[in-house]
Image: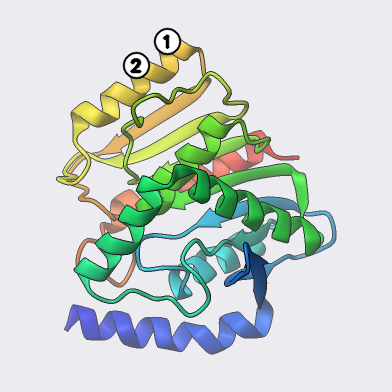
Amino acid sequence: MKVLASIIFFLGLASSLLASGSLVTYSVDGKEYEGYYISPSKNSPLVLIVHDWDGMNEYEMKRAQMLNDLGYAAFAVDLFGKGVKPQTVDEKKAITASLYKDRAKMRTLLDAGLKTAKDKGANVANAVGIGYCFGGTALLEMARSGSDLKGFAIFHGGLATPEGQDYKKTKGDIIIFHGSADTSVSLAEFAGLIGELETTKIKHEAISYSGAPHAFSVFGTERYKEDADRKSWDRFVGYLKETLH
């Protein structure tokens, strides 16, 4: 029943979201990608949204709408390709694994998403990123690349640093929201990243929520944890007020 309710919920969102924002098709190395852009006004601070392993869909669009209502522009990037919406766990593992193996491509796609937002008129000089699960992992890749984003907000993302990488080029600060009951990303991995950021002297903040599983903020799913979602979103909104102007 929860899965059915989730499907109905997301289908109900689609028409209203498209009425206020717009899907944006853009090209990277000859392949089409499709993001979602919304902005309350010209030159609004930007939040770049990076999707989970099921692709850019109504969840990211809803978060973009929530940010728009708070006065921020939002662009949800697409890292998989236009129309690519993996359904099974095996499909999701395969497409994310291909990007984990090609970090250069991942960075190219992230940078292309930010450029597309700029082309739409977004204020990329006054911007932060937010990533969910796989998207959080990807956003950390963007942080390590030396992106000019002012900050990187990671929601229940993979936190391990790939061999041979570090945070020496990172310019923005990092805020991490983690579920203490996450069985996909351990507390040891969570603590390990905190230690690495401290050693590298990257300004950071890390919060864990008791009883919260992996993907705790994805409403409409069995893993959704309302208390952790509310608290993490409230802190993220506060973080935006502190970081953007």
User: Which residue occupies 30% across, 72% down?
Assistant: 220
Per the image, label 1 sits on a secondary structure element best described as helix
Could you give the CA–CA distance between mark 1 and mark 2, rounded to whole angstroms? 6 Å
Residue at label 2? 195
Q: Position of residue 43 (x, y in %)?
A: 83, 54
User: Which residue occupies 31% across, 54% down?
Assistant: 97
Question: Could you tell whether 196 is left or right of 38 in the image?
Answer: left
Residue sitting nearer the eye, 128 or 113 = 113
Tell me which corner region of the image, top left, top right, bottom left or bottom right, holds residue 217. Answer: bottom left
User: Which residue occupies 53% across, 20% down?
Assistant: 203
Residue at the extreme front of the image, as rendered: 30
Question: Could you tell whether 80 is left or right of 192 in the image?
Answer: right
Q: Position of residue 137 (x, y in %)?
A: 39, 44
Dot 2: within a 10 Å radius of its alpha carbon, few (fewer than 14), some, or many (20 or more) residues? few
Tell me which corner region of the image, top left, top right, bottom left or bottom right, holds residue 177. Answer: top left
- The amino acid type found where label 1 is placed reads Thr
Per the image, label 2 sits on a secondary structure element best described as helix
User: Which residue occupies 30% across, 52% down?
Assistant: 227
> Quadrant of the image for the C terminus?
top right
Q: Position of residue 86 (x, y in %)?
A: 33, 74
Residue at label 1? 199
- The amino acid type found where label 2 is placed reads Gly
| 1 and 2 marks in contact (CB < 8 Å) | yes
